[in-house]
Amino acid sequence: MAQLRAGVIGLGRIGSTFDDEIIRGGTFFLPYCHAPAYHESPLVELVAGADPNDQQRAWFADRWGLDQAHVYTDYQEMLRREELDLVSVCTSARPRAAIIEQVSRAGVRGIWAEKPIAMGLAEADAALRVCRQHGTAMAVNCHRRWNALFREIKRMIDAGDFGELLQITVHGTFGLSSNGSHMLDTMNFLAGSPVQWVFGEMESDAAAAKDEESQGNGYLAYANGVRGFMRSMRSGAAFTSFDIIGEQARAMTGDDGMTWRLIRRVKGDLERPSMRPLSNRFTGDLPVEFPFPLPRRLQASGLAIVEDLVSAVNGGPTPQCSGEDARDALEVAIAMRESHRRGGERVTLPLANRDLWLVSSDTYQDAVPARLRKKK
């Protein structure tokens, strides 16, 4: 099978060089971001990039061995000239939905987009509608859906190892639209069901009154009976922790999935010391800790996303995190804020008002690329 031709729009950290900043293993298995994943995938050839910033273009061409003729100031020129099969959209969230529409209309078969895919529900809906009309597959970089360890948890849930799934709890400190979209999407992924309604609390009344993203807490009710709680307000020593509770098993990580504890209910008969001789035996289910079943294949999420997207454009299933999945995470975040605005009312999904916005923090100061701001 011939390699697909791939290009990147937005040649900054997540589009090109974020992997170069990773100096030791941990949450990320490399390649993680877009250009490195295309570069290393046997399914794809990285052939072009576009960015209005001169320095970003120069770095990209040098890092990935591209001729300057294939690095463009105007992404629309790149779309016209390069006959691309796959395009990554790694810009600020501000223009992202509009660019997704134009990439789809240009006949590109697959889009790998950053999150959030939009800042408003109406523009997210419009971008998804255009992709459906033009038959464009889309994967969105909520990477835990492709992380081998989170996928092992999902496999166990689907296999019935947890019994009935009851609760998913997430703690961390992040804005609801930027990094919070990762957490909300992971909860949705594990729950395997749409959110029906939410309660939400933002960090302050003033923050809730604005359209800019803020930290917040939320209670999520899923259609299949699963309940979720996310704390993204200041969480102290809870560094991006997940707690997944079922009738028969529980899995916990306090370090964003690097290590897991797995506890199962086991029928047993336990002797225990007691001052009362007649009550020194406990019978029934016991909580027993088991080794976490490491998957046989620890594939980097970047390569897994490329593989998934290539499969989708060749007629396979929808990518693990689709545009619709990303839009759903954004909608939950907005609903949490709307709950606060309404005095803590329960807010039902889907939201009737599609003109609601949540301005991602990655747009702040986005006139200067994040990598250049980081170097100052």
Image (cartoon, rainbow, N blue to C red):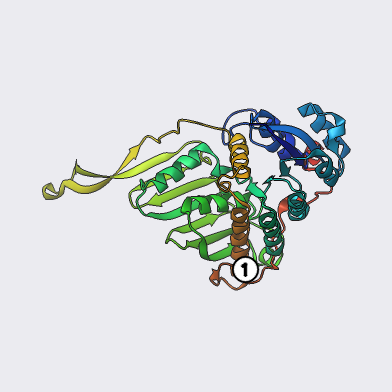
Across and down, in percent, residue 267 comes to 23, 45
Residue at the left extreme?
278
Towards the viewer: 351 or 167: 351
For mark 1, give the secondary structure: helix
Q: Is residue 304 visible?
A: yes
Q: Report the label total.
A: 1
Q: Residue at x 46, y 63 (%)?
A: 223
229 to the left or right of 335 = left
Across and down, in percent, residue 44 comes to 68, 33
Crowding around mark 1 (Cα neighbors within 10 Å: few <14, some 14 to 19, many 20+) is many
Q: Residue at x 41, y 39 (%)?
A: 261
Q: Residue at x 67, y 37 (%)?
A: 33
Figure check: 68 above or below 115: above
In the rendered image, which quarter contains the C terminus?
A: top right
Name the quadrant containing residue 240. top right
Across and down, in percent, residue 318 comes to 57, 48
Across and down, in percent, residue 225 comes to 42, 61
Residue that carries the numbered disc 1 in the rendered image: 338
Towards the viewer: 244 or 272: 244
